[in-house]
Image (cartoon, rainbow, N blue to C red):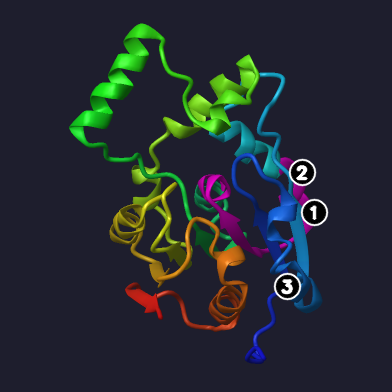
């Protein structure tokens, strides 16, 4: 049973992670669709022309913000959080609140061993990269490189849209330390940590994700910062 809130969320824009699509939200979709208007974006993660992060943001602005016809909230995962950050900074009056989970945008910190391995791959051309990278076309690979090389720290420092970060303690793709850096940079961000979840909190623990997200989006109070742990 989920708590009933007085304030009604009219529209939520869902932004999925890299290499997935709107189907990734299947576990939580029925609840949100029964309580508000939902718009699901499907990104082309293997485009025919090379794209940048800004190109994806442009696409969402042109195709989906016009469809909203007013303000909305955002629920975004991983790569979708990258788009959400730039979208919110460009349109602060149109984005009311955001729930970002497994959010990408902080450049990873590597051990010396890993740094040397990456350096070796760049110098020699050896190594196939991640699974995400291997399946892409030439333009898709360049697009992927453009995305992951973009560090959003400056953008986060300018982001004032109230934001709930939901992070899995077991997340190996966007490790927990990235979430802690994020909360220090964005003054209006609160983080909840799911001890038993990984990169897909909304799949690993959909009930808690729905309760936390809906509660945050429907309450009148803005985010007051802080880190909370889900037991």
> Do the residues under discs 2 and 1 have CB atoms within 8 angstroms?
yes
Which stretch did the figure color magenta? Answer: 62-83
Residue placed at 45% from the left, 69% from the top? 196
> Do the residues under discs 2 and 3 have CB atoms within 8 angstroms?
no
Residue placed at 73% from the left, 41% from the top? 62
Give coordinates of residue 220: x percent, y percent. Answer: 53, 83
Magenta segment: does it hold 59? no
Give me the disc on residue 32: 3
Mark 3 vs mark 1, CA separation in Å: 18 Å
For this rendering, which residue is in front, 174 or 67?
Answer: 174
Q: In which quarter of the image is residue 59?
A: top right
Q: In this view, does 9 lie to the left or right of 116?
A: right
Give me the disc on residue 63: 2
Mark 2 vs mark 1, CA separation in Å: 7 Å
**Label 3 CA crowd tier, 10 Å (few <14, some 14–19, many 20+):** some
- The residue carrying mark 1 is 67
Does residue 69 appear in this view?
Answer: no
Residue placed at 63% from the left, 36% from the top? 56
Magenta segment: does it hold 67? yes
Q: Is residue 220 left or right of residue 135?
A: left
- Up/down of 111 relative to 85, above or below: above
């Amino acid at each position: 049973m989920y708590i009933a809130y007085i304030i009604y969320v009219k529209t939520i824009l869902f932004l999925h992670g890299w290499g997935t699509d709107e189907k990734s939200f299947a576990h939580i979709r029925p609840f949100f669709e029964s309580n508000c208007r939902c718009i699901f974006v499907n990104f082309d993660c293997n485009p025919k022309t090379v794209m940048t992060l800004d190109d994806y943001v442009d696409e969402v602005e042109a195709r989906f913000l016009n469809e909203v016809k007013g303000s909305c909230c955002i629920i975004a995962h991983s790569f979708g959080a990258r788009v959400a950050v730039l979208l919110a900074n460009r349109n602060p009056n149109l984005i009311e609140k955001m729930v970002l989970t497994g959010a990408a945008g902080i450049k990873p910190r590597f051990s010396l061993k890993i740094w040397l391995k990456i350096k070796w791959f760049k110098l020699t051309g050896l190594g196939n990269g991640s699974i995400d990278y291997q399946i892409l076309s030439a333009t898709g690979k360049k697009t992927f490189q453009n995305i992951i090389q973009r560090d959003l720290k400056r953008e986060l420092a300018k982001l004032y849209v109230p934001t709930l970060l939901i992070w899995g303690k077991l997340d190996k793709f966007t490790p927990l330390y990235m979430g802690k850096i994020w909360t220090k940079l964005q003054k209006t961000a609160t983080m909840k940590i799911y001890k038993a979840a990984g990169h897909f909190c909304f799949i690993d623990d959909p009930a808690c994700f729905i309760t936390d997200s809906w509660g945050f989006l429907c309450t009148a109070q803005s985010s007051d910062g802080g880190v909370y742990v889900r037991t």
